[in-house]
Amino acid sequence: MEKRTLLAVVLSVVVISGFYLVQGLLFPPKSPADLPVGIPTESSQGVTPALGAGPSAGAEAQTGTILAETAQPAAPVAPASAAVQAANEPSAQSVTIDTNLIKVVLTNAGGDISSYQLKEHNDHGDPVDMVLSGNAAAHAFNIAFGSRDDLLAKRVKPIDAFFRVRRVSDYIVEFSRDFALADGGQFTLIKRYEFKPNEYLFQLDIVLNGGQSVRGFDFQGAAYTLSFGPQMGPKFEKLDQRYEYRHYITYKGKLKNEKVNDNGPTVISTQPSWASIAGKYFTFIAYPYVNQFDIAFSTQAEPGLPAASRFLITRPSSSSSVVEDRYQFYLGPKNQEILGKYNTADNDWKLKDTGFIEVANTRGFLAPLETLLKWILMFFHRIVRNYGVAIILVTLLVKLIMFPLTKKGSESTMRMQTLSPKIKEIQEKYKDNPQKMNAEMAAFYKKEGYNPLSGCLPMIIQIPIFFAMYNLFNNHFDLRGAMFIPGWIPDLSLPESVYNFAPFKLPFLGWSDIRLLPFIYVGSQLLYGKVTQTPDQQGNAQMKLMLYAMPIVFFFILYDVPSGLLIYWIMSNVLTMVQQVSINKFIAKKKAIAAANAPPEPKPVIAPPKRKKRK
């Protein structure tokens, strides 16, 4: 390696090291923001029969404005002349919805969802569960009569009383419960869930039906607050921004990443079309069909969970005696192909132009390159059906495309050896005058038609490819759980491990696994340096230091990267060595042919010895 190559390598280390430090900020999988809102559904004309019946028929009509401080859930309302019997109180009951994609368990305690399993995606051998409740009594999609601030401050509690259950069909279930108010008013809360086969998206209808008994719903300025949380699955030990994270998103024509406060709820000032909590591979999307609503995100701690990620949507107070709202929620893979169907109406809900795909879209200045590499990877995977082999084929293709540059760089390095004596002469001659030396060097390079950067150009081009590959292997959904070699590399999106000694961790490093690929990488990098060394570099102490030090530095940098990235780099080293050996043979053969065809050098004329003059 020449000095210019050394400079390129050092710059590469600095750039790559900086990338790992700030990649969470520069290349976070972005989030969405606002999209066209659906049709508002608040109605003052009553509830459609499909959504359930109103209060008990024998209840006496009551009038008066609902007051938050006096509104309390009660046992089911019975006719005024009848006493409420304990036997009339519904008992605990669960309902299971089973489709080809999801298995959902709903509980009549609040009419919530307690489990939402994705059948086609596993987490440590079990189906991924998108609902993590921790120690909370209320589960996902619970309702509280009051504002989000009251709910988070625990001034009001989510409803956890038992609801009546009506199984409408295999994929539709309805929960209902009657509530009595201190002023004598009575109303029914109805929660109706509808699921569909082939869909991760479901529909939730919420109805507050006061009939003639109430004049409106106003609990401290809100009709109700609907909450998803306290955490979205799958399970995790910590949100380290590499293996798992949570991004908070809103969408209204364009994507927006929301920064969430740690010390309280983050209220979204604008009314977006939809909102999302996005993880590394899975996402939650809330798509309201309501005219007016306020949304907020909260990371308020919840017992039994390492972190909380909560979504809250508050329905403002209403003067209508009947409020009917509709929401659609997506809980599933953060997959471009699946989410893209909601842009083209290629889904059973016939949704289109939603913009959901923005949750999964690649972002950053390397997005075009990453998208291209992803397309090539998917193309090869369709042929070989193994992502590890597909990565090797992508590496081979990249090397073939870059071969002309690699060959030119090698020829440039060889030529540099022939120019080296003249360069050293100029450097020695003008060592006390750097400006003059640079001018003479530039003139010399121009005269010889030589570009000093051409030798390290292939290495510089590798840097953006490396970053794009890192983002691809770290975020591409299809690589999650993609196996290469059974028993060794079960997931190309994660570091491989041959031995785990947790809970013990190596001091300072924090490692709890022995990984084989980083050691293979070091070996390939050392061989790569040996093969690509030129004869004049072999005795250079500085070059020897770089040869042995650089692989060690990268060993620590790359120890915990996705195994797919290391496979790419190792194969890149191996293929580069093969290329270099071939190029060296080609150049040597070219030199031999040139030497054979060159005219013989004229023999030096030896002057005859002078005769001594006779005296």
Image: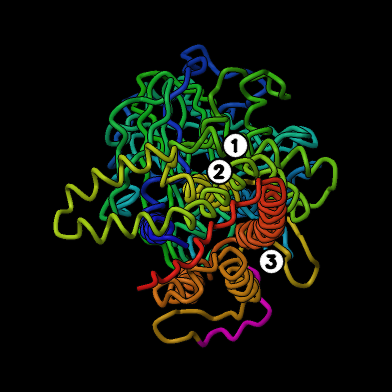
The reply to whether residue 89 is in sight is: no
The reply to whether residue 258 is in sight is: yes
| Side (left or right) of 247 relative to 440 | right
- Disc 3 marks a residue whose amino acid type is His
Under circle 3, the secondary element is: loop
Whether pointer 1 and pointer 2 mark residues with C-beta atoms closer than 8 Å, the reply is yes
- Disc 2 marks a residue whose amino acid type is Thr
Name the residue that disc number 2 marks.
283
Which class describes the residues within 10 Å of circle 3: few (<14), some (14-19), or many (20+)? few
Under circle 2, the secondary element is: strand
Q: In this view, does 601 lie above or below 329?
A: below
The residue stretch that appears in magenta: 496-504
Whether pointer 2 and pointer 3 mark residues with C-beta atoms closer than 8 Å, the reply is no
Quadrant housing the C terminus: bottom left
Name the residue that disc number 3 marks.
124
Q: Residue 377: within the magenta?
A: no
Q: In this view, does 513 lie above or below 193?
A: below
Q: Is the magenta stretch mostly helix, strand or loop?
A: loop
Q: Distance between the residues labelled 2 and 3?
A: 19 Å
Q: Where is residue 276 in the image (x, y as percent from the top left)?
A: 48, 38
